[in-house]
Amino acid sequence: HDARTAGIDRLTAVVLSENLPMLEVFRDSGFEPVLRARPGEVELEMPADLAGGARARYEARREAAAVEAVRHVLRPRSVAVIGATARDGSVGAAVLGNLLAAGFTGPVIPVNRRGGTVAGLAAYRRIDDVPDPIDLAVIAIPAAGVLEVAAACARHGVRAIVVLSDGFAEAGPSGRRRQQELVALCRRSGMRLVGPNCLGVIVTDPDVRLDASFAPRLPRPGRVAFLSQSGALGIAVVDALDERGLGLSAFVSVGDKADLSSNDFLAYWDADPRTDVVLLYLESFGNPRRFARLARKVARRTPIVAVKGGRSAAGARAAGSHTGALLAGSGAVVDALFAEAGVIATDTLGELFDIAAFLAVQPAPRGRRVGVVTNGGGLGILCADACEVRGLDVVALDAEVAERLRPHVSAKAALDNPVDLLAEATPEHFRRAVDALAGSGAVDAVIAIYVPPMVSDPRAVAAAIHEAAGRAPVPVAAVMTMADAPVDALGGVPVYRFPEEAAHALAHAARRGEWLARDEDDIAAPPDADDLAAASVLAGALRRGPGWLEPPEVAALLDAYGIRRPAQHEVTSVTAAARAARDLGGPVALKASAPGLVHRTDAGAVAVGLSGPHAVTAEARAMDARLRSRGIQRTGFVVQAMASGPVELLVGVVADPVFGPVVACAAGGTSAELLHDTSVRLAPVFRRAAGEMVRSLQLFPLLDGFRGAPRCDVGAVEDVIVRLATLADAHPEIAEAECNPVLAGPDGAVAVDVRVRVRVPPSVLPEPALSPTGAPPMSDATG
């Protein structure tokens, strides 16, 4: 109570790693502590609020603060333009002109050094001279003067600033220092920042009519919000959307994303009744785990479509495991983030527009069955091919559907799927065919394709398709293969130039429908996981410094999280290895341990199928000789009971500096990197996602009884994934962990060879949901 009264919302305790009783006291206190292993000690961080749902309330306050901050940017009551001028070709003149041309509904206040009059408005020499409150200030002056002007804005009580100036983080070390000073100033004052180095913001709502940008023209009003990290790309996208008949509710260029980010704008657009689709162009993530949580929530109601530039894994990885090699330099991590969060990821801007055109006016289909109607047989075939390639099913139509169609089309029409109405098809033929297909129950979506022959009126055909789509119980898309398609006559039907574009957009929409239909996972850790025991092991290991865990520590860590492993003994001598083999009985594997030895097989430090103490003794001596010849000094042996299972997999995790723990499931053994059969998710991974990972692998048929082989226990493999992901998510001191191979068979899955590397993780302090003064918090630096 005293902590909350004083404005303290987090408490921290430090306990020696061996003091398990005290750790248990904190675990049972009801604080729900977050554990971090440090060298020789465990740090516990807890919310001061003991009431249930503390974390959910924290996130809710954080989102509310973000929405309020963005409101001052996108719905300001007044706007000042600092650097406003009448000089042609200047950014300040373009911004002021755009604000006036758009008809901003509040006061527009020019500020420049000379004062006087600009564009017919009285100008002030300094922001301090303005007598009225200002919600938003747009700064369009050289970078060297921005800090001084921003400080003046803070003194005046300006709620948010948009810094158009370049010369910040993108300009090298001096620019980065300037940006850090700007952000620090904003944080101290509670003033929010868009940019720097951005194009500005636009809102088409007739109640606002804000064009605080230097974009060349105002986009048409619509129900699509677009956020871009690139200003130039933003201009191109606005033009392309306009050409496709799509309008914007808002456009935001975030530039260097020093403060307000995609996370904050997503939270705002989630509650915006004028936005039906959100488009994102991102080049970087600052807090991708928060992005994933927020996007998953928003995407349930509002489709999010994203193009990400620079699709390589963020940050360099000094990885010694197969897992690190599989993930390094790939776009798999970004794809995993988007897929799990329900974000529709596209590779090109063309796809971004195509999908936006569909989802802005049509719901996601409930399945993958597609009906195609065309007056050009070749185009219908191309469309069917494109659908099949993208995982859609152009289903065969039953006789009943054909019979309903027959009286309303040409006698020569082909009533299979695609339905070919032939060149003489009339608007009525199109209307009847779309009606029959959409209402048949045999398809989940319809694509109507029109090629203009000499004898028909494209506008009449478009109107007929629009009429049928208006009463269709499934989504409808149109393809009109002509330069000047009558888009206005199609109304709420998305229109494409070529069949492949429609098929691709529909495939993405179908995946969204599947994502919406699936159940939410149970967000719960394995009930038998002993988090305190794991933290104690890791803290004890960190006392030595960063590096790979010793075999006994690895075994204890696996046991703490219930990851099944073969029985084993850790010994230091050849004689003890022979005794361990006798105690275990049956065939054993012998593995040497040495500092820095990660890939044992490559070093000749693994032998399997050894029967009896004599075989173990002989192999141990030979192994010692091999290692000495390579300059490796053995420190011990692991003698392990042989495990069986027909399928080898890899389950691993790497701590990405930006994305957090990244979990991989792949074909295992020594060929893991060669086969590159990998599925990736971000931790935590729960049962449904783990099942999707396993089933997406090319080797899944081997697990599922390929050619009469016994089926493996896939649930046991999923369990290993869930437990390892939960372990890594709970303990950020784990830099990488890998179970390779995991042997899967009918009787379960066992992690045969496991390695874990630890380091003291970067210290990250949680941002408060609200400051003690009630000012909104700063959001993630980028995100």
Image (cartoon, helix red, strand yellow):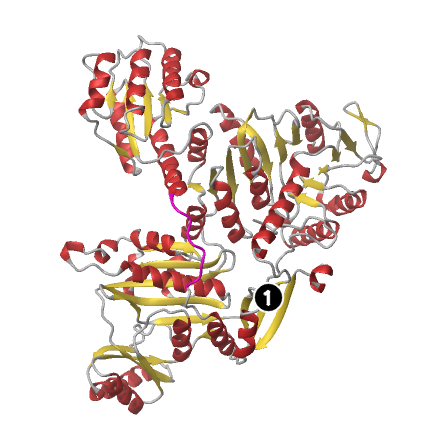
Q: In percent of the image, x 36 and y 69: which residue is there?
A: 563
22 or 298: which is nearer to us? 22
Q: Position of residue 420 (x, y in %)?
A: 24, 20
Q: Is residue 72 left or right of residue 443?
A: right
Relative vertical location of residue 91 with respect to residue 521 in this rendering, above or below: above
Figure label count: 1
Task: Name the spot of residue 593 as percent of width and height, x first.
Answer: 36, 80
Q: Which residues are magenta?
A: 518-526
Q: Residue 524 lies in magenta, yes or no?
A: yes
Tag 1: residue type?
Glu
Q: Quadrant of residue 478 in the image?
A: top left
170 versus 95 height, above or below: below
Name the secondary structure under disc 1: strand
Which percent across, then down, holds residue 175? 66, 51
Would you say residue 415 is visible in this rendering? no
Q: Which residue is mark 1?
A: 45
Q: Going by the image, does 529 lie left or right of 78?
A: left
User: Residue most toward the bottom?
Assistant: 575
At a point 79% along the width and 22% down the height, the residue shown is 120
- Circle 1 packing at 10 Å, graded few (<14), some (14-19), many (20+), is some
Split into 4 quadrants, where in the image is the N terminus?
bottom right
